[in-house]
Image (cartoon, helix red, strand yellow):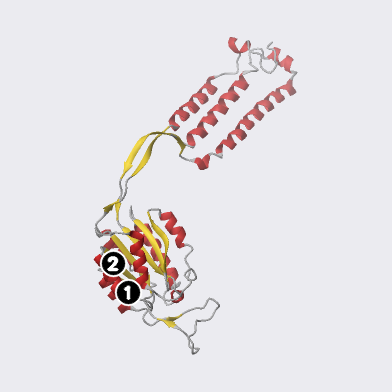
Amino acid sequence: MFRIANPELLILYALVAVVVGLFAFATYRNKRQIRLFAEWNTYGRLASATSTKKPYLKLVLRSLAVLMLVTAVIRPQIGSGLEEVKRKGVDVVVALDVSNSMNARDIQPSRLERSVQSIYRIIDKLQGDRIGLVVFAGQAFVQLPITTDYGAAKLFLSNINTGMVPSQGTAIGAAIEKCMETVGDSSIKSTAIIVITDGENHEDDAIETAKEAASKGFVVHTVGMGSPQGSPVPDGRGNFISDGSGGTVVSRLDDALLQQVADAGKGKYVRASSNADALSVILSEIDAMEKKEFSSKMFTIYDEQFMWFLAAALFFLVLEMIITDRKTGLLSSIKLFGEQQK
């Protein structure tokens, strides 16, 4: 199997044509300057020991050297065998609250934006682990199935907003259930669920769901976004959301509920703030979890071939340097471009 390690550098082949063109132009210009000194046939008699063909040979050698150098830079490789790679790690499923209350700004830049930043940090700390993402408000949806593609996870995160779940509310229990469905069996205790929310649960019994998750081998951690004092919820039009009586809706962090959910799920509860990242506690817990072996994958082993092209480039350059402009018997017998040696 053949591949190129640096395909983005294939554009350098276009530069080869430019360099060859410059070499050819230099050769032509040199010949033209000689003609300004004397007619070509006259010059041939005056410089009878100088070859008129070797400049073209040297041009070919220089061009081949550049071509070989570019080929070496793009690093051609040939597959020489297969290698089996087995990975061990844990499954981490993040349930992110995207209800309107997450737009509150009692932590900066907002509860939701700070939550997304925290998930980015979680992803950056993972090594061989799998990650999944569930978003929830009044309902819960799988945003990213369990995967080891951290780049895809970050791409999905960049599109998170509070309008992606049609029904408003905060169904923490439904979010935990959806996380369990995403992973499946976790009987060997290697799956962590991280619920990131302000804790204003209005939809279901989150504590009982966390207990059920713990009984199935899941560990449920909670991260509180916001402050107990609360903050008005922006409506996206420069004002704040109001209730039925015209009063401003103030969203407050429910520390007590989130602590109870974490206790029921045999996990940890931490409160995020604008000045400190509390995720270190949960990340340490995840790192200490029992690792499970994921399905092994086969990878092709590739051998580098660039050294052969590098050696060829060096050969052509050295050969070009040692060839003089004097005539030799072999080249004198070659009729190039219809020229006659005199």
Name the secondary structure under disc 1.
Answer: helix
Q: Quadrant of residue 146?
A: bottom left
Q: Is residue 28 above or below residue 216?
A: above
Q: Which residue is tagged 1?
A: 206
Find residue 20 and report its horizontal and vertical position in percent. 61, 31
**Amino acid carrying mark 2 in the image:** Ala
Residue beneath the point at 26% across and 72% down: 264
Secondary structure, mark 2, is helix
Residue 224, can we see it?
Answer: no
- Which numbered disc flags the more N-terminal residue, 1 or 2? 1
* Residue carrying label 2: 213
Q: How many marks?
A: 2
Between the residue at mark 1 and the residue at mark 2, the CA separation in whole angstroms equals 10 Å
User: Quadrant of the image for the N terminus?
Assistant: top left
Coordinates of residue 241 in the picture (x, y in percent): 50, 82
Which image quarter is the C terminus in?
A: top right
Judge whether 36 appears above or below 71 on screen.
Answer: above
| Residue under the point 47% across and 79% down | 233
**Badge 1 density bin: few <14, some 14–19, many ≥20, Cα 10 Å:** many
Q: Residues within 10 Å of mark 2 (few under 14, many from 20)?
A: many
Q: Nearer the viewer, residue 75 or 217?
A: 217
Give the answer, above or below, for where 274 lies relative to 120. below
Instruction: Find residue 211 and report its horizontal and vertical position in percent.
Output: 26, 70
**Residue in the picture at 37% in, 65% down:** 178
Q: Residue at x 54, y 39 (%)?
A: 10
Can residue 218 be seen in this snapshot? yes
Instruction: Tell me: 49 left or right of 84.
Output: right
For badge 1, the amino acid type reads Ala
Give x and y (percent) for residue 39.
Answer: 75, 18
